[in-house]
Amino acid sequence: MNAASIATVPVAVRSPTGRLGRRRVAFVVVGALSALFWLAANAVPAFASCGTDKPAKSQAAFVGVVTSTASDGRVATVQTDTGAIVTVIGTPDTGSAATSVDRTYQVGGRYEFHPINDASPFEDNVCTATRLLSQGPVGPGKADRRVAVVTAVLAAAAAAAFAVFRRRTPRRA
């Protein structure tokens, strides 16, 4: 093919990744990213492997309000109804990402704790009878932040795709 014949060939034939091809690729990429972010935002925690249907009650049970948390909500500082400040650890391993028996706590939540041991720091997990009695004031939580991050990433991807196509689309006179 010489230069004169290339000029007469339609754009879609000259370049398999021409304007139409780039748009398809962009839609597939944005769709795949959207699906991945949706899956990440709606992930559910794994179920516990307690081995029993009846949660364990404790002789050292107490009631208190969670004043702060750490380790993604798995470690709580609690003010008990008797006025004591105690620590409750809701995971067997605070250094790991997560385990199947992790219990998380909400700041401001009032709990009836049924720890495994009888002194602070108390050990707890989802296999005990610990339960949320009432929820404190609700502020922006992890789910709200996650939705905001996903929305921002999708908006940035859409803006980038628009900029790429706008730049590469020939202007008509």
Image: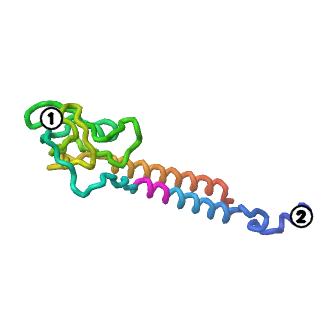
Check the image and name the residue furthest to the left.
82
Q: Which residue is mark 2?
A: 4
> Which mark's residue is nearer the viewer, 1 or 2?
1
To which quarter of the image does residue 18 belong? bottom right
Residue 158 sits above or below residue 121 on the image: below
The residue lying at 49 percent from left, 56 percent from top is 36
The residue lying at 34 percent from left, 50 percent from top is 143
- Asked which secondary structure carries label 1, the reply is strand
Residue 56 appears at what percent x and percent y?
20, 49
Mark 1, Cα crowd under 10 Å, few <14 / some 14-19 / many 20+, is: some
1 left or right of 129? right
Q: How many marks?
A: 2
The residue lying at 75 percent from left, 65 percent from top is 11
- Is residue 7 shown in magenta? no
Residue 99 appears at what percent x and percent y?
37, 45
41 left or right of 60? right
Magenta residues span 34-41
Q: Earlier in the sequence, mark 1 or mark 2?
A: 2
| Residue in the foreground of this view, choosing between 138 and 42 | 42
Q: Amino acid at mark 2?
A: Ala
Q: Is residue 111 visible?
A: no
Mark 2, Cα crowd under 10 Å, few <14 / some 14-19 / many 20+, is: few
Q: Which residue is mark 1?
A: 79
